[in-house]
Amino acid sequence: FQQAEGAKLQFGLLLILVLCQSGVSVIFSFVGRDFYSALSAKDLAVFQEKTANYAVGLAVATPLTVLYKFQRQRLALSWRQWMTSELAKQYYQ
């Protein structure tokens, strides 16, 4: 981990994205609760407001989720490449 260039930065970014992803899940939980409460109460004004909140949440969550998955795969590939080169060095020495 200390020898891999940029590994700490990639890992830090991944941790930040995990926290953001968790926050988005919590927010969606609350928005979904209010959405279904308004739907069951047949309150049109609150229902429209929560539908707009859902749309905004999707607009924010989609790129965040894509970036999280991309960063996770990128870190995994970097780690595999580093591990392969290290094992090959140790094997051929």
Image: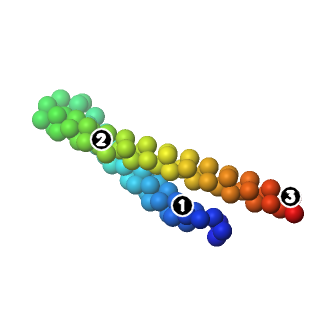
Return the residue at label 1: 11
The mark nearer the N terminus, 2 or 3, is 2
Q: Position of residue 7 (x, y in %)?
A: 58, 63
| Outermost residue to the left | 45
- Which image quarter holds the N terminus? bottom right
Labelled pair 2, 1 in contact (Cβ < 8 Å): no
Secondary structure type for disc 2: helix
Label 3 Cα crowd, 10 Å radius (few <14 / some 14-19 / many 20+): few
Q: Nearer the viewer, residue 40 or 45?
A: 45
Q: Nearer the viewer, residue 67 or 57?
A: 67
Disc 2 versus disc 3: nearer the observer: 3
- What residue do we see at 42% from left, 44% from top? 65
Label 2, label 3: how many angstroms apart (C-alpha)?
Answer: 49 Å
- What residue do we see at 54% from left, 61% from top? 11
Label 1 Cα crowd, 10 Å radius (few <14 / some 14-19 / many 20+): some
Secondary structure type for disc 3: helix
Q: Position of residue 69 (x, y in %)?
A: 49, 45
Secondary structure type for disc 1: helix
Left or right: where 74 falls relative to 26: right
Return the residue at label 2: 59
Q: Position of residue 76 (x, y in %)?
A: 61, 51
- Which image quarter holds the C terminus? bottom right
Q: Is residue 7 visible?
A: yes
- Position of residue 3 relative to residue 61, above or below, is below
Q: Amino acid at mark 1?
A: Phe
Left or right: where 14 falls relative to 42: right
